[in-house]
Image (spheres, rainbow, N blue to C red):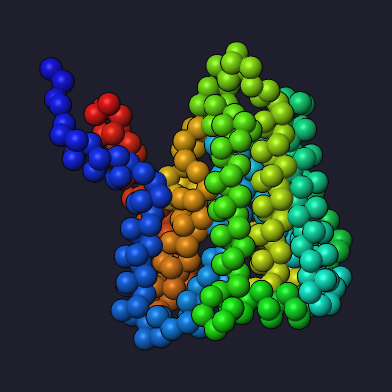
Amino acid sequence: MTTQLSPKRLRLRGVLSNGVTIVSLLCLILYALYARVEAGALSVSSFNDLVNNAIPLAIAAAGGTLIILLRGFDLSVAGVLSLVNVVLAAYPLPGPWGALASLVLALGIGALVGLCNGLLVAYGGFQSIAVTLAMMILTRGLALVVLDAPGGSVSDWISGTLTDTLWGFIPTSGLFAIAVAVLWAIFRRTDTGVALYAVGKDETAAALSGINVKKTRCVAFTLAGMLYGLAGFMLSAQTASGNPNAGDSLLLLTFASIALGGTAFTGGQGGLYGSMIGAGALMLLQKVLFSSGVQSFYIGLFQGLVMIAAVIFMSLMTRLASRSR
């Protein structure tokens, strides 16, 4: 016997099974806790600092989400972040035009790495985790060639202007995240965006319906690489210097943000919004723990526990929602 639920309960289950809703609520809770334990948490400077810390991870998670939606795995994110960071620190270009050239260079590095990944995975038939692991090792090696130790200096315009505020209260770095979100809203409605979900849900059915699966994979990896390049650009603005291991600390956090945002690692379900907000939640959790006096080596433990709890809750609500259909 099937139990019929009222429209109100169905709507409630639909909301709770949405990863963006869950992680947004988590962000609000964590921000309230942060405001409680840190006196200046609600100030403009504190909020700007939080956004600056979260943006590189948020954009990196956005790129990783494209590959997870295809039921793939991309480890090259750490290498691209590191390579872009050391290139911008070793060869700083002054002024706004220099910053624009640096941005194009960062996007180009990411696109090239992503294209190589896409060609090998889509047309070469190799496993994504093997290809991207090799590419991560390669790009980290190149980063060491460019800068064999922490040092260098990112352009003052990049490190100063892009981490400052507009009109005294709008974080400049946040505009890059907004741009990514807007572009995703447009891309998702294109044929390639629709194909991305179709391939992730059922590759065979997608191919039978006329979708070019190989092209879709290659485009997704290339776009993901460009987002990694942008994340490296924003990371460089935040650190103001180069480090050949700059991206290592964000590797696991990238996948944690994706999982926290409700994107299914089985492919075809989720999106960039949840992953980007998930990155904000992880940064907020770090702030709360630091302000509470928790020692740094416990932070990873707490982040893992929060992520596991969120994923379990998301899974339960998704099952409930599917049963009610």
Residue 80 image offset from top left, x and y in percent:
73, 54
Above or below residue 247? Residue 16 is above
How many marks on residues?
Answer: 0
Residue 155 image offset from top left, x and y in percent:
78, 77
Question: Which residue occupies 60% across, 58% down?
Answer: 179
Q: Quick one: quadrant of the N terminus?
A: top left
The picture quadrant where one finds residue 66 is top right
Question: Which residue occupies 23% across, 36% down?
Answer: 10
Furthest-top residue in this view:
208
Residue 61 image offset from top left, x and y in percent:
57, 52
- Observer-nearest of 45 and 137: 45
Question: Which residue occupies 72% across, 42% down?
Answer: 222
Question: Which residue occupies 16% across, 31% down?
Answer: 5
Residue 2 visible in rendering: yes
- Observer-nearest of 64 and 126: 64
Q: Is residue 154 left or right of residue 184?
A: right
Q: Is residue 315 left or right of residue 102?
A: left
Residue 150 visible in rendering: no
Residue 32 image offset from top left, x and y in percent:
32, 72
The picture quadrant where one finds residue 167 is bottom right
